[in-house]
Amino acid sequence: MEKKLIEIFKWLHRHPELAMKEYNTTEYLRKELLDAGVRLLDTKLETGLIAVIGNGEAPVIALRADIDALPIQEKTSLSYVSETPGVMHACGHDFHATCMLGAAMLLKKHEESLHGTVKVIFQPAEEIDRGANLMLGTGLLNDVQLFLAGHTYPWYSVGTIGIRQGPVMSSADRFSVCIKGKGCHAANPDVGIDPIPALGAIITAFQTVVSRWVDPFDGAVVSITRVEAGNTWNVIPETAFLEGTVRAMKETVREKIRQSLEQLAKATSKAFGCEAEFEYEQGPSPLLNDIGVCERASVAARELGLNVEINPPSMISEDFSRYLKLAPGALFRIGTGGGFDNHHPLFTADPSALLQTARFFAALAEKELERLNY
């Protein structure tokens, strides 16, 4: 099986596809699953799959993998480097898909002895925060009582599983502010209303939200990532614009920051004689790992000879959190070595971790079904 999984992983790595375009990836995984005798559900989606192992009855748990790649030009020297210009699996989704495919194959071998049902999700479009909602929207996961997932982690060596209870990843929201003033010639600022000083004041004010409005023990980030105003040197523009991101480990903090940003944007703009249009778009929620699942996963990992670490929390987000609105679960970090962070053009995931990761998820799935059954 290890040889087979490495072959699959290398094919997926050579043929990355962007979010919502994972057609060949889906068909390749479909064929491998059907060849292994694994049943597939009809999602009616163009990309992505849901496989089923077991008797089809409760209890039901789900293993989730994402399958989309990133718009990054690969710069590794791997023998199986991406063959698609400007696209690569720089976040390990090829690794995730292969591991969960391997888990499905292992579970299929023990299907008659399973105490329930395992659904294996091969999810599209994680990188653009669309895939989880698409999968949940099929209604095919409404009976799931527990969700499990993994993510590559280059800072752990192969053979290590990172398990953290409670908050493990943050929410990820987008905000924007359009400041409306009155344009005029730069030589006559008194006849206009300059939105640029208001823009600068808002930027300064936003930097105080985390340091002065949020409990120091609550993880949060406010980052302004884009600023625009004017298009020439001698004209005061009509409008100015900024946008950025909010990250938080708690829903209450997330909402408090949203309210604070809107209040500051509008009040500051008004103080400068301008008006502000504030927009806020929520992305994935904070990802909270179930305590009991983490405790049992630690035992299962050690029984397989894996090293268990308490991984640090991250202000990066994951749309796996959307599944945890439906049922509890956990996401674990999988040691894959490499030394370059996710989304880097030199990112790699060591294929020697494939089989042990597949075994870990298959074993944990069996144990959780047995526990839920009794």
Image (cartoon, rainbow, N blue to C red):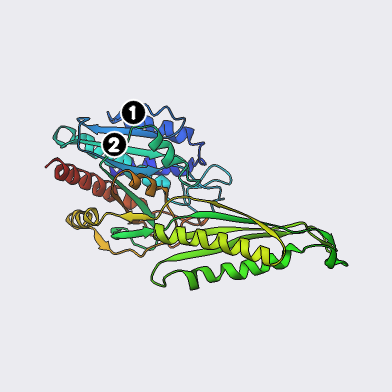
CA gap, disc 1 to disc 2?
Answer: 9 Å
**Residue 290 located left or right of residue 374:** right
Q: Is residue 270 placed above or below 145 in the rendered structure?
A: below
Q: Is residue 315 visible?
A: no
Residues at circles 1 and 2 in contact by the CB criterion of under 8 Å: yes
Q: Is residue 304 placed above or below 257 in the rendered structure?
A: above
Q: Which residue is mark 1?
A: 41
User: Circle 1 sits in a helix, a strand or a loop, which is it?
Assistant: loop
Q: Is residue 258 visible?
A: yes
Crowd band around label 2 with a 10 angstrom C-alpha radius: few (<14), some (14–19), many (20+): many
Amino acid type of the residue tagged 2 in the rendering: Lys
Question: Residue shown at 73%/62% (left/top)?
Answer: 195
Q: Nearer the viewer, residue 39 or 144?
A: 144
The quarter of the displayed image where residue 307 is located: bottom left
Question: Residue shown at 35%/38% (left/top)?
Answer: 121
State the residue lying farthest toward the left.
Answer: 374
Residue 141 image point, x, y percent: 32, 36
Q: Which residue is mark 2?
A: 119
Q: Nearer the viewer, residue 345 or 281?
A: 281
Residue 351 image point, x, y percent: 36, 50
Residue 127 image point, x, y percent: 48, 47
